[in-house]
Image: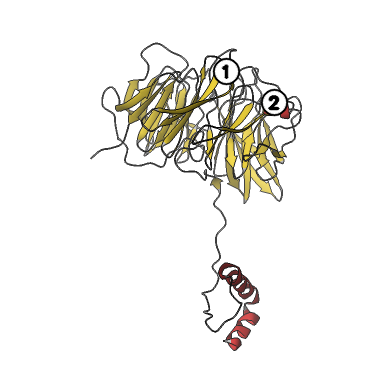
Amino acid sequence: MRSYLSVMLKERRFEVLLLFAAIVFAADKPLYSETFTLLSPLTVTSSPAEGLISSQEPDWPQWRGPRRDGISDEKGLLESWPEGGPKLLWKIDGLGRGWSCPIIVGQRLYITGDVGSDLIIFALNRSGKIQWKVKNGRNWKNPYPGARACCVFSEGRLYNMNAHGRVVCLDATSGQELWAVNILERFDAKNITWALSECMLIDGRNLIVTPGGKKALMAALDKRDGRTIWTTEPLAGDSTSHSSPILFRHAGRRLITSCSSAHGFGVDADTGKLLWTVPLKNPHGVNASTPVYGSDIVYYVTPYAEMGRAYRLIADGQTVTAKHIWTSGLDTVTGSAVLVGGVLYSAGYRESRWWFAVDWQTGETKYELKDFTTGAAIYADGRFYCLDEKGSVGLLKPGPNDLDIVGRFALVAEKVRDAWTHPVLHDGRLYLRYHDTLWCYDIKEHR
């Protein structure tokens, strides 16, 4: 044994030393004994995959799903709907006014609504029964009153930001408040015309917020106690907007991108260092859509000005630059976009209030669908689940040349123009909200 180890140390000294260290720390035994067994050669593991970084939590724990991209990995769903839509399992009223969508973890759903003068966070069971409800500060009484941001879940705790910048951490089982901070006060920031709407991001122990203040453009709070971990330098004359961040890996680095009132920007997820900015300024200071990332390209959209713009990210050492590669006529506001199979699907807002399929590499429009107006969609099992702002729900099957409507129904009977809540899909159930009411539909294929 000793002669064999001697040869190994000469020929593969570094690997053997690593091997012995692993044995010592893992087994807590002497480096050598008569019962020592030589392990197989060390295996070289590949580096983490590039692309969007998924939540560490199961189910639908945050805005737009596990990767914040509006895509569910579920299979075995209905290929089409009967007239009138899929089977309604339950609905609940009394959730207050608002556009926030539910998140789902385990046997609980969490959703917010403005009730009376308060923002209320509700916990429901999977049958739609209220388990608890707590306040998170004041409601929003100014233009477009209603709850904005949805919750995010991590390690048994629930986080939410109200319209005035109050960030709260709750015990997800009981609703007990554990800590709260106001990010506008902490980072010397001001509220915006239509109120804070950011759906916060959890990254490890960091809770990511975008105050857009004099002390920070973006910041990471410790999710355990709310203290500040890092900040991103402010942008002169800029403020926050209504966008929500995404987390992804590019060229071996973990990056976060979001939008302020005048820029699309990217930061280092570990330090908060500002890496790039691109122009996204419009007359209203509103950038609401969540950015999209895929294949080294990041996409931002702002209405009334630059419209939909794609940038290729180029890494060079510690720097990352964003090179503009194409512009689309899309002027999405509340709906965001979904990237599937090299095609970007989204609806316009002012100029073209219908749906588009856009080539991800060139920005060219492949086809359009005018039977639904502007709205939001999620994707699962080869189909889109669309809720447009008039309250029409559609099941759309994408093809090479069109979006085929394979199901549709009206969610609300009255005439509306503000059905802006994003659909949620989990465990064969489709969740749709219009202000005070949440509906739950069975969309699973039962054979």
- In the image: residue 387, left or right of residue 442: right
Q: CA distance from mark 1 to mark 2?
A: 16 Å
- In the image: residue 378, left or right of residue 10: left
Q: Quick one: label 1 or label 2, which is nearer the N terminus?
A: 1
- Depth check: 89 or 287 in front? 89
Query: What residue lies at 57% left-to-right and 18% top-to-bottom?
Result: 139
x and y percentages locating residue 419 in the rendered image: 45, 19
x and y percentages locating residue 39 in the rendered image: 52, 75
Displayed quadrant of residue 118: top right
Which residue is denoted by mark 1 in the rendering? 139
Residue sitting at the far left: 447
Residue sitting at the far top: 415
Q: Are marks 1 and 2 in contact (CB under 8 Å)?
A: no
Label 2 secondary element: helix
Displayed quadrant of residue 391: top left
Q: Which mark is residue 184?
A: 2
Badge 1: residue crowd in 10 Å (few <14, some 14–19, many ≥20): many
Q: Amino acid at mark 1?
A: Asn
Query: What residue lies at 50% left-to-right and 31% top-to-bottom?
Result: 337
| Quadrant assignment for the C terminus | top left
Label 1 secondary element: loop
